[in-house]
Amino acid sequence: MPELPEVEHARGCLERWLRGRVVTRAFARALVGRRVESVTRRGKWVRVSLSDGMLLFAHLGMTGRWMRRAPDDPRERWERARIDAGGVSARLVDPRRFGKLVVARTDTPAWRALGPDPVADRLDARALGERLRGRSRAVKEALMDQAVVSGVGNILATEALWNARLDPRSRTDALTVADVRALSRGLRAAIAYGLSLQKGDDAAYAQDADAENPFRVYGRSGEPCPRCRTPLARIVLGGRSTTFCPGCQVRRV
DNA sequence: AACGGAACCTGAAAGC
DNA sequence: TGCTTTCAGGTTCCGT
């Protein structure tokens, strides 16, 4: 699930696989012959910096993942791109094709438009409050707006709001200082948990068919709330499926 | 300006 | 069994 934790894991993988190595083959000619200098992340975007100021921006979309292979290994099913360097072959596999790869020499508009990253920028309650203030909208929609805060997707938002005992429909301008503090903590906890699920070079995407849902409320509508046993509800907010507990998540309007 | 809905693309799971 | 519908971790565009 490419939200902040998975993308951070992908960043670390790409760094381990490629940093310090010269690209010998790639989906884009501009990358070949250049050395990978660093791999950074903001929100759900990864930026690979190469020598001569060449930049590669990568977004995993909904179903993207990077896999480590050897240069001689056959093409993966749904493989969309590859970067070979120093005997490693990084393959971008993305069934739904929502992922993006952009080669540029300057930061792209999409990268520059990103709001603060909860991990890279150590977003505290005060900063979060400032980002949410100003407009009246459903707090879940605000959290998932990449210009407000970057890296939060449907799962993180759902889990963070449950942690904070806040109804996803609550209006941002109705939140109390205590609400924002709870939300900040809840978001950090959800991210830390997501990061803890990431292991190894590809275990990150171990969402295999038989893998059990590791989340508290996401994808569990109809099941009893782990906190108060009220059946979890499912609504659609901003076009996205939203699970929450009508019993213990308070609605501010 | 804001909001809902559709589109992009493909597969898995559920429904009949 | 097999055909149809619904849903999915994200973003962007379009019309009201």
Image: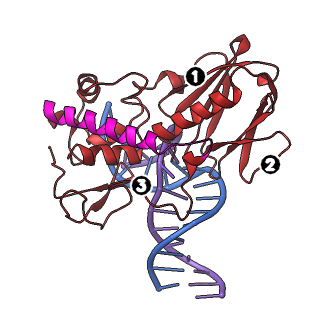
Chain colours: A red, B blue, C purple
Asked if badge 2 and badge 1 are on a common chain, one would say yes
Q: Which residues are magenta?
A: A175-202
Residue at coordinates 54% horizontally, 43% vertically from top-left? A199
Asked if badge 3 and badge 1 are on a common chain, one would say yes
- Expressed as whole percent of the image width and height from the top left, the position of residue A182 reads 21, 36
Asked if badge 2 and badge 3 are on a common chain, one would say yes
**Helix, strand or loop at mark 3:** loop
Disc 2: which residue: A75
- Mark 2 and mark 1 in contact? Answer it, CB < 8 Å: no
As for residue A100 lying within the magenta part, the answer is no
Q: Name the mark nearer the viewer: 2 or 1.
A: 2
Residue at coordinates 62% horizontally, 52% vertically from top-left? A96
**Disc assigned to residue A214:** 3
> Which one is earlier in the sequence, the residue at label 2 or at label 3?
2
- Expressed as whole percent of the image width and height from the top left, the position of residue A124 reads 28, 24
Residue at coordinates 22% horizontally, 43% vertically from top-left? A164
Residue at coordinates 74% horizontally, 54% vertically from top-left? A77
Location of residue A20 with respect to A175 vertically, above or below: above
Front-most of A108 and A59?
Answer: A59
**Helix, strand or loop at mark 1:** loop
| Chain holding disc 1 | A
Disc 2/disc 1 C-alpha distance (Å): 29 Å
Image side of residue A197 versus residue A88, left or right: left
| Chain holding disc 3 | A
- Mark 3 and mark 1 in contact? Answer it, CB < 8 Å: no
Disc 1: which residue: A108
